[in-house]
Image: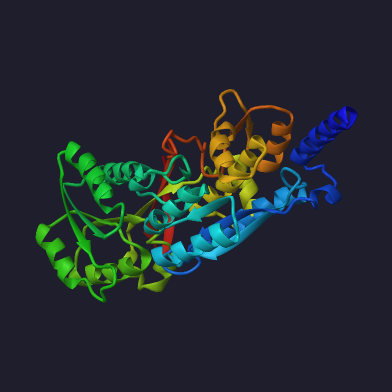
Amino acid sequence: MSSFTINRRVFMGGVAGLAATGLLPHSVMAQGGPIRLGALTPLTGSGGPYGPVMVKAIQAVAGEVNKAGGVLGRQIEIISEDDQTNPEAGVRAARKLVDVDKVSAILGTWASSVTTAVAPICWESGTLLATVSGADAITALPHQGYIIRTQPTTILQGRKFGEFAVEQGVKKLFFFSPQTPFAESQFNNITAAVKAAGGETKSLIYDDKKPSYRSEVDEMLAYEPDVIVLGGYAADTTVLLKDIFRSGYEGKKIAFAYSVNQKLIDSVPAEIVEGIYTIAPSPAQSSSAYKRLVSLIGVENPDPYTTQVYDQANLIIMAIAKAGAADGKSIRDAIRSVSQAQGGDVVDNAVDGLKLIAAGKPINYQGASGPCDFTATGDISDSQFRYEQVEGGKLKLLKIA
């Protein structure tokens, strides 16, 4: 009996090592079911232009790892659900992923309202939630470490909007926004930057379902701003821009890049959007991870959310290998040891990372969206931003800083 115990331990240790390197025979791998990860993205609704490509990136990472042999002797299975850019639909989808599909982690929630609604389901079930939402309140929730966010907070985004407005010579800034979890924080941080430069601000929160914003535009005109910041999503921003154009306003306009995107630009007469500035967190375009992602999914210039979920998928898979377990708590406890281990070997993909983990080496992941270092509350610690301007019906890059 004693001899069997020793030999069994040796065998299991060998299995674990082979699994982590992807060299485990398929006959042994078949003994364990797949590790399920949920992709909860906006395939429809306001976020619809982004969700399908986000899912493609997540599936590409899983496919690459599975082709190399999987992790812990198991294949990765991605289960995709549509949150419809709607909190109620997001909750229904999250319940299915957690209760029926038994996923270990959920990746990719986009709208802050959806993430806020889904988060309690995740921490109560011990499921890791990786999000691209920006509202500061998300990581202020009592999430017990089960949230990581690859999107810069609205504190940082608001400051960037305000600083850019100052660069444009702002004296009076008017902020339009629907009621979102990040509207107040966004405005407060814009205001801090503008006031520090001697300017002033005013905000207006509108109903994003209205067919016209003429009365809201009249209030803006009465304020006589030289810069307008548009804080809404694509659908309501389209309506608002048309009313602003009809009003004759000739000042500068700054918007989120996720709302004034190429699809919106192509959908309206050119004069309505000409000259608008857009701001977005910038992918790490010069990084090897970014180039690898482009090659994997065949999409030139992937948007920031796609680069972020690519990083989320790589990090979660490596965390599973590092922990030696695929449950949410183990992923939560191990993820920083692969995202930012001090003195760790730099990797840009999970396949290479799994080999280093099997060799007992620390990992420092450098991703397609940036360094991917997380604070104690789960926020990304820094990011570059991309500044563009609509010129001749196309977005022209001004700078990345």
Residue name at image x 36 percent, y 55 percent: 256
Q: In the rendering, at what x and y percent does residue 270 appear?
A: 36, 69
Quarter occupied by the C terminus: top left
- Left or right: where does residue 260 sit relative to residue 354? left
Quadrant in which residue 268 is drawn: bottom left
Q: Note whether 89 is above or below 152 in the view shown.
A: below
Q: In this orientation, which residue lies closer to the viewer: 393 or 98?
A: 98
Colour pattern = rainbow
- Residue at screen point 81% across, 38% down: 15
Where residue 285 sits in the image (x, y, percent)? 54, 44
Q: Residue at x 33, y 47 (%)?
A: 137
* Residue at the left extreme of this rendering: 222
For the view shown, which residue lies furthest in the front direction?
A: 1
Q: Is residue 374 left or right of residue 13?
A: left
Between residue 102 and residue 61, name the one nearer to us: 102
Residue 359, by quadrant, is: top right
In the image, taking residue 45 as reference, residue 38 lies left or right, namely right
Most extreme residue toward the top is 343
